[in-house]
Image (spheres, rainbow, N blue to C red):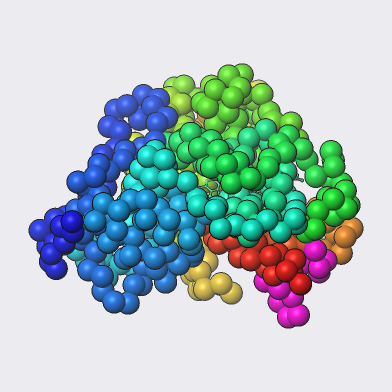
Amino acid sequence: MSRKHAFQFLDLPRTMPQRIPVELRTSGDWGELYGKFGKEDAQYQAGRCLDCGNPYCSWKCPVHNAIPQWLQLVQENRIHEAATLCHSTNPLPEVCGRVCPQDRLCEGSCTLEEFGAVTIGAVEKYIVDTALATGWRPDMTAVQPTGHTVAVIGAGPAGLACADRLAHAGITAVVYDRYEQVGGLLQFGIPSFKLDKDVIRRRRDVLEGMGVQFRLGVEIGRDISLQQLLDTHDAVFVGTGAYRYTDGGLDGQDLKGVLPALPFLVQNSRIVGGDDPQGRPIAGWEDQIALPDLNGKRVVVLGGGDTGMDCVRSAVRLGAAKVTCAYRRDEANMPGSAREVANAREEGVRFLFNRQPLSIEAGADDEVIGVTVIETRLGEPDANGRQNAVQIEGSESLLEADVVIIAFGFSPSVPSWLAEHGVEGQANGRILAGGKGKLPFQTAHPRLFAGGDAVRGADLVVTAVAEGRDAAASIARLLAH
Ligand code: FAD
Ligand code: SF4
C-alpha cells in the first residue's frame, strides 16, 4: 500500500543509507561505504518523489531509467516488478545505483533539489539487491534463439551490457577478456569501498544463467586473432576501454616512489579482494609496479577526477599519515563527483586547489621527496568551454611527499589488430563508430561494432552501459536481415 502524501518531502528529509564510521575507514576498512536501505527507509525515500510530470531525472540519466515509475513500485512493495522495470533500461542497475555520480546526473536534476533530491541511486541499489536476493531473475521465457553468435571483446560494463541485450534478443554472446575475472574497471579499478566485488560476481552468475558465456584470461590480438573471432561469430563487439595514460611529462615522474594511478588501484584491489595477497601483476598488464608500503607515509595525489579520489581514499585505508590532493583548477571545476570529494575530506584528505605540478623532486637516492607546484588562477575558457588554469608567476612551493600518485586520466587507442581490419580511430585514439550510412556503433568494418570508453574516451560506467546496450540493438538489426 502506498505511503505517499503529496508533501512527504517536507516532513521527511533526504537521507542516504548509513555509512561505515570514519574511524573504521581510516583504520583500513575496505567495506562498501554506504549500507543498504531497509524496506521502511526505501519506501519513505521513494515516497518523497513528487512525480512532477516532467521527470528531469529520467532525461538526465544516460540510460533514461523510468525512475518515478519504479519509485512508485517501491512504495507499493512490488520489488520484483520494480526490478523488471529497472532492467528494461539498464542491464547493470545495481552497479549504477552504487557508482553513478548521481549529483551530476539523475539526482542533480531532481525537481526537489532545494529540499534535498530523492535518493535515487540508493533506492535503485535497494530494488535490485532485494529482488536478486529473493529469487528474481530476468525472464527469458519468451526469448526465441536465433542461432546467431556474437563475440564480445571486453567484460567491462559496455561488454556486459551488450551481452545482456544480445541474450535477450536470442543471440549467443561469448565474452572474451584478458583478465581472469569479469567487470573490467568495475573489478580492477573502482575500489571495494565504492563497489563490493560480490556484486560483480553475482551479476556474472545472472548473465551465465541467461546463457552468456565467458572466456577469461584470453587477450585478443595475442592469444586469439580478431580474424578467428570473425570466422567463428556472426559479429563482434569491441568494448576494450581506455587504458592509455595522459602523460603529464613531468620531470621526475620516473623516480622511486612515483606511481601511476591505475596499476596502483588494480594491484591494491587484487590484494584487498584476496585474488592475490602478494599483489602480483595481472598477465597482460604492461605497467607493472611494486606496491609500496604507504603506512605512515606522506602521499600526494596529482589530479582531481574520480581516479584521483579513489587513490586518495585508498591511501587513507592503507595507513598513510598525510594524504594531499593537488588540483590545478578550483573545487567547482573538479571533474570528480562532489559526493566523493566530501567523503575524502571526511576521511582526512587535504585538498590543495589551484596548484599545478611543475616537477617531481628527487632526494639523494633518487627517491621522491616532493612536488614543486605553482599557484594558478582561472583564465579564459578553452575550446571545450572549461576555464584554463593560468600560472601565477613567482608562486612556486614544494609539497613534501614520500609517495606521489599520478592520476591525470586515460584515453583509448586503436590497437593494430583492429586497424588491420579497417577500423578507424580519431586523433585522440577513440574508435570511430556510427555516423552517416552506418548503424549506431558500427565501425568501418560492417561486422565490427564498438562502444564504451573505447569509443567515447574515459567516461562513466552508465554511459558505457548505455552504449553496450544500444550497440547490441544495432547488431540484432544487422543479423535480422
Ligand atoms: P572497461 O571497464 O575498461 O573494460 C574494458 C575491458 O576490456 C577490460 O576488462 C579489459 O581487460 C578488456 N580488454 C581490453 N583489451 C582487451 C583485449 N585485447 N582482449 C581481451 N580483453 C581486453 N565511472 C563511474 O561511473 N563511477 C565511478 O565511480 C568511477 N570510478 C572510476 C575509478 C577509476 C579508478 C577509473 C579508472 C574509472 C572510473 N570510472 C567510474 C569510469 C568507468 O569505470 C569506466 O568509464 C567504465 O568502466 C568503462 O567501461 P568499458 O566497458 O568501456 O571499459
Ligand atoms: Fe541515476 Fe545512474 Fe541510476 Fe540513471 S543509472 S537513475 S543516473 S544512478
For residue 230, side relative to residue 33 (left or right): right
User: Looking at the picture, how far across and down is residue 143, in whole percent?
Assistant: 60, 57
Q: Nearer the viewer, residue 79 or 328?
A: 79
The answer to whether any part of residue 74 appears in the image is yes
Of the 4 image quadrants, the one containing the N terminus is bottom left
Residue lying at the far left in this picture: please name it. 11
Q: Is residue 317 left or right of residue 361?
A: left
The quadrant holding residue 291 is top right
Q: Is residue 137 magenta?
A: no
Q: Is residue 448 left or right of residue 244?
A: right
Residue 382 located left or right of residue 35: right
Residue beneath the point at 34% across and 46% down: 126
**Tally of numbered tags:** 0
Q: Is residue 103 above or below residue 188?
A: below
At 43% from the left edge and 56% from the top edge, which residue is drawn? 84
**Quick one: quadrant of the C terminus?**
bottom right
Compare residues 400 and 470 and report the one nearer the observer. Answer: 470
In the foreground, 38 or 244: 38
State yes or no: residue 446 in magenta: yes
Residue at the spot x=42%, y=71% of the render? 59
Q: Is residue 351 visible?
A: no
Q: Position of residue 463 (x, y in %)?
A: 54, 60
Q: Position of residue 215 (x, y in %)?
A: 72, 38
Q: Residue furthest top?
A: 278
Q: Magenta residues: mostly which secondary structure?
A: loop
Front in this rendered view, residue 275 or 408: 275
> Where does residue 450 sit, x and y in percent of width and height?
71, 60
Task: Classify 328 as above or below 204.
Answer: below
Q: Residue at x 22, y 52 (%)?
A: 43
Quarter of the view holding residue 414 = bottom right
Magenta residue span: 434-447
